[in-house]
Image: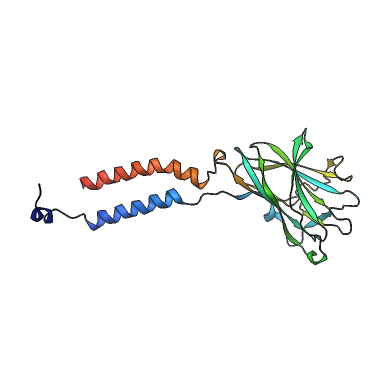
Amino acid sequence: MLNREAMTNLPLPSSAASGRSLSLTATLAALVFAPFVDGAVVLSNFSGFGAIPSAFPLRHYDGTREAIRVSTGPGSWSLNSVSIITEYLSTGTNFQIWSDSSNTLGTLLATSDTVGNSLALWHAGTQTFTFSTPVVLSGSTNYWLTATPTGSFWNPNWAYNSTATFSSTFGWSQVGQLSSTDSGTTWGTSNNRSFASLEIDATAASSSGVPDGTSTALMLLPGAGLLALRFRRRTAGA
């Protein structure tokens, strides 16, 4: 058994080794608990719009509509909100998500909260349509998105730019656009309005390549343990 005198003569850990150990611990802790993307803009063409973009009316009384077909990235997704740019928005408007059926709108899947319905909202800018319950979408699947005016007095104008370029993240893309003049009963060519303003915010499931914080921490912890053990062995042999 070591006596007290012998113990006092044992070498103390060097400050450098101690500093490296603390540094590694802090790094691993930050790595394990760092926030990973659990909600992000996954598709946008907002950067392709000028201060006063062209706009087309979305009239309730004559049934004018526009629909954008998008393809989701791999994995499963929860769509939280969709934003568009409007010249003005004075009537109540909501956003709808439809399934794809042979390159046209199929079944209505979800409708957002209503935005507008006030003359005070006569302004150009970004309007965000939020879904009270996030809409679950399958990966690598086509869906249709369309703005629907609910009032009958004024027209919300949806901005478009025939040359805008979409910025696609996590595998999302725009793959088509259609127009309707009978409130969506029939759909046809979009009359050169192939880039209506659109920005989609969605949350990715861990299987889509954008893991959430919990699953990432669980995946990193075994590796963190191995790295810590290896580091301790190296510093012990120094």
Question: In the displayed structure, does residue 154 sit left or right of residue 39?
Answer: right
Q: Position of residue 88 (x, y in %)?
A: 80, 61
Q: Nearer the viewer, residue 56 or 206?
A: 206
Q: Position of residue 178 (x, y in %)?
A: 81, 43
* Residue occupying the point 45% across, 50% down: 33
- Residue 97 sits in quarter: top right
Q: Nearer the viewer, residue 56 or 228?
A: 228
Q: Position of residue 70 (x, y in %)?
A: 71, 42
Q: Note whether 69 is above or below 163 in the view shown.
A: above
Question: In the displayed structure, does residue 34 sit left or right of residue 47?
Answer: left
Q: Position of residue 214 (x, y in %)?
A: 49, 45
Q: Residue furthest right?
A: 62
Q: Residue furthest bottom?
A: 120
* Residue occupying the point 68% across, 36% down: 141
Residue 169 seen by the camera: no
Q: Nearer the viewer, residue 146 or 196?
A: 146
* Residue occupying the point 78% across, 64% down: 121
Q: Residue furthest top?
A: 102
Question: In the displayed structure, does residue 138 sit left or right of residue 36?
Answer: right
Residue 64 seen by the camera: yes
